[in-house]
Amino acid sequence: MALTPVQVRLVDAQAHAARATWNLLHDFWTMTPKCRRSLKAADEAIRQARKEIDWLGVLPAQAAQAVLKAYHQAWKNCWEGRAGEPNFKARLRTVMSVDIPQGRDLQITRVHRRWGMVSIPKAGRIRFRWTKDLPVGKHADKDNRITGARLVKDALGWHIAFRVQSLDTVPEPRTSPEAGIDAGVNIPLALSDGNHQDHGRPARLPNGTADRDKWLNPDEKAKLLRLEQRAAHRKSFRKRGEKTSRRLQNTYDRIKRLRATATRRATDWQHRTTTELARTYGVIVVEELDIPNMVKSARGTIANPGKNVAQKSGLNRSISQEAWGRTVTMLTYKTARHGGTLHKVPAPNTSLRCSACGFTTPGSREDQATFVCKNPDCGWSGNADHNAARNVLHLYRTGHALVPAAGRAVVRRTRGVKPATAR
Ligand SMILES: [Zn+2]
């Protein structure tokens, strides 16, 4: 969105008020005895708080209601085992956002091929980049319309995301073609049929370490390095407990903007790639990788810390960097939208097994990129990532696909309470 500095301050104030409402609500909910907790009581409390605290009033009443709805949903997610308990939202760690729960308040008009205008409650008419087809004006009807919006702030400024309701036809179910996908070492996504999806950016630096800033071009990388050096230099003059200077804060903001640009490019590539895959293939098979647990188990405990944490957890495969979990999520809903399905298979040995003869032994990997079979009768050699992708597909074809358990597979336990056997 293109906001004037005054409008930025208005929307910022709304986001702070929304966060404060959440925190007050959480306080109210946890302090109230269980027998007296109800949505009606919470609603009353919000109304009273908005009357008594002036600055909460900058948040439109509809948006305050949306906070209550989101808070209630957070508890439902907790009770049904999908998430932990909701908590207070800290000023510095929380993404700033404001909800606009009703579509008819928005009054969207298109003013240019690339620009539209939208009404934001208490901030006025605001110009925004028109990046997608929206059901507006003569394109809108009972089944295809905008039902609300959400404003979200990142390092590059405020953005608007529209909630759209649309009527789609149910896609024809299809079961071919099939493809196994491996989150590769050198290729971000290697496919079993020899194709691959690459963003053309090397995942590592010449010295072998993962390249965190691969989505920035050389000029931007140089700029980032200069800014980081400047920030470190300025920080060296800061005494303990002294407030961060405006100049230093400015440098930090510029670093954050560059990083946000990189993140945006990575997500864009991910979206385009997964859409392409879901359109092409009817059945997509991936490895089941439990990344948080992989990191946790390798890290060990305080008494017995893990060694070679990065190697063991598989992070040297820069899985975390390529956001594999998000790729799988995108593939799940996108394949469903195109009538296809996504299957998961257990991960062990997919990178060690030879996809030509089935011989599994450690050491078949010559280096990160090439796989040479150690079976004397076979001797197959080829790209290690494609080999793993073919193994993933083989596991699916031999009936090893994992059936998702209902609910969450892990046993949830209140923090701090030891299991009965250990007490
Ligand atoms: Zn072989």
Image (tube, rainbow, N blue to C red):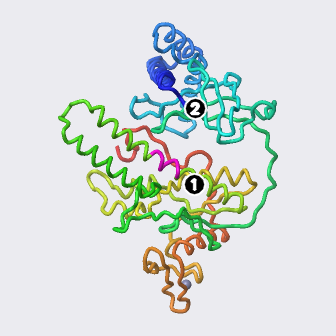
Q: Nearer the viewer, residue 323 or 196?
A: 196
The residue type indicated by label 2 comes to Lys
52 drawn magenta: no
User: Residue placed farthest to the front in the image?
Assistant: 112
- Residue range in magenta is 260-265
> Where does the C terminus fall, quadrant-wise?
top left
User: Residue placed farthest to the top in the image?
Assistant: 52
Quick one: label 2 or label 1, which is nearer the N terminus? Answer: 2
Of helix, strand and loop, which one carries label 1? helix
> Would residue 36 be visible to someone looking at this image?
yes
Query: Is 289 placed above or below 370 here?
Result: above
Residue depicted at x 45% and y 52%: 292
The answer to whether mark 1 is within 8 Å of ligand 1 is no
Q: Nearer the viewer, residue 356 or 110?
A: 110
Residue depicted at x 36% and y 67%: 208
Task: Please state the horizontal and vertical placement of residue 195, each as a whole percent of the image.
Answer: 62, 70
> Where does the N terminus fall, quadrant-wise?
top right
Mark 2 neighbour density, 10 Å: few (under 14) some (14–19) many (20 or more):
some
The residue type indicated by label 1 comes to Gln
Task: Please state the horizontal and vertical placement of residue 158, each as a whole percent of the image.
Answer: 52, 33
Give the residue pinned by disc 2.
Answer: 76
Quarter of the view holding residue 175: bottom right
Measure the alpha-carbon separation of dots 2 and 1.
31 Å
> Would residue 30 be visible to someone looking at this image?
no
Image position of 255 (left or right of 189): left
Q: Are marks 2 and 1 in contact (CB under 8 Å)?
A: no
Give the residue pinned by disc 1.
Answer: 270
Query: Is 10 placed above or below 225 here?
Result: above
Q: Nearer the viewer, residue 162 or 379?
A: 162
